[in-house]
């Protein structure tokens, strides 16, 4: 394959928390280590962008504020993204972007953000954040990462999950599922970044992209370091829930209390 593999990176400025950029770097390096070239195409709000020649799409996570600043722009690109998703272009959406690829995201103020509806799922922000190490049993093996979200994602009947939670909260801390898969489009709460410690998932996405050019297999890489990192991550303690806005003493009252000591 002479042409570079074209990776569209959705809103790299706004949706990029907890090292999510590391996912794009992992995809690029795993292509280059095999002799392929890669081209990263940032998609920013308001920018004219043609998805028709894109080989892979990545979207990271972000705070509610970042989601609200990108949700409208993403919606405007919905027809193109739904088409290429249905055509089998691989996509990986993390947390905030995962939520916006579902039917809707209700933020903690009750504001509703319509989603792309690629995943038959809906997300509602809760009063507590689900934070910590996440371990998931999936078709791509055991996946490990870090989660930090208040959104509780509920999958509709028949919507396939990425996997089942072995440790952590996953989609909502209750139904035991994590993420969602439609064709080659994958959503997940795995931050970390996810792909450096989950080479099987990274190569699955790359193979989905390369198969469109008749490339049916990838040369194996030495993933010993990645496996060791995954083993360490999987052994880390369970996560926890924290109240969204714990009652904090205003600073001046805290200072007065100190003066009173
Ligand atoms: N703001 C969303 C939530 O808290 C997504 C957070 C994220 O992308 N880490 O659920």
Image: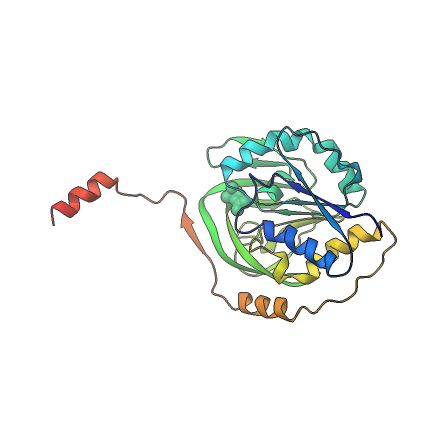
Instruction: Return the residue nearer the eye: 201 or 242.
Output: 201
> Total number of numbered labels?
0
Residue drawn at x 20%, y 40% is 253
Image quadrant in which you'd find residue 142: bottom right
The answer to whether residue 68 is left or right of residue 260 is right
Instruction: Return the residue nearer the eye: 142 or 209.
Output: 209
Residue drawn at x 69%, y 57% is 29
Outermost residue, right side: 214
Measured as percent of width and height from the top left, residue 78 is found at: 70, 33
Measured as percent of width and height from the top left, residue 152 is found at: 54, 45
Q: Is residue 136 visible?
A: no
The image shows residue 224, relative to residue 190, as above or below, that is: below
Residue drawn at x 53%, y 47% is 17
Measured as percent of width and height from the top left, residue 112 is found at: 55, 31
Residue drawn at x 60%, y 56% is 194
In this figure, which colouring scheme has been used for the structure?
Answer: rainbow
Q: Is residue 149 visible?
A: yes
The image shows residue 199, relative to residue 253, as above or below, that is: below
The answer to whether residue 117 is left or right of residue 53 is left
The image shows residue 67, relative to residue 238, as above or below, that is: above
Measured as percent of width and height from the top left, residue 95 is found at: 58, 46
Outermost residue, left side: 260
């Amino acid at each position: 394959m002479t042409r570079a593999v074209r990776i569209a990176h959705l809103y790299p400025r706004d949706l990029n928390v907890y090292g999510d950029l590391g996912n794009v770097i992992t995809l690029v390096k795993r292509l280059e280590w095999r002799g392929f070239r890669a081209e990263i195409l940032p998609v920013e709000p308001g920018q004219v962008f043609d998805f028709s020649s894109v080989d892979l799409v990545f979207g990271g996570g972000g705070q509610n504020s970042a989601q609200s600043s990108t949700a409208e722009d993403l919606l405007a690109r919905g027809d193109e993204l739904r088409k290429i998703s249905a055509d089998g272009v691989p996509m990986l959406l993390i947390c905030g972007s995962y939520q916006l690829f579902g039917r809707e995201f209700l933020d903690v103020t009750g504001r509703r953000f319509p989603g792309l509806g690629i995943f038959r799922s809906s997300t509602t922000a809760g009063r507590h954040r689900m934070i910590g190490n996440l371990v998931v049993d999936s078709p791509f093996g055991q996946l490990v990462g870090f989660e930090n979200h208040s959104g509780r994602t509920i999958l509709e009947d028949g919507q396939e999950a990425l996997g089942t939670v072995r440790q952590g909260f996953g989609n909502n801390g209750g139904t035991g599922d994590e993420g969602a898969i439609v064709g080659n489009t994958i959503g997940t709460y795995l931050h970390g970044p996810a792909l450096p410690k989950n080479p099987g998932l990274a190569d699955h996405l790359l193979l989905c992209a390369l198969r469109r050019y008749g490339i049916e297999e990838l040369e194996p890489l030495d993933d010993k370091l990645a496996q060791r990192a995954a083993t360490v991550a999987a052994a880390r303690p369970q996560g926890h829930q924290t109240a969204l806005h714990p009652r904090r003493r205003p600073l001046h009252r805290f200072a007065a209390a100190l003066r009173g000591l």
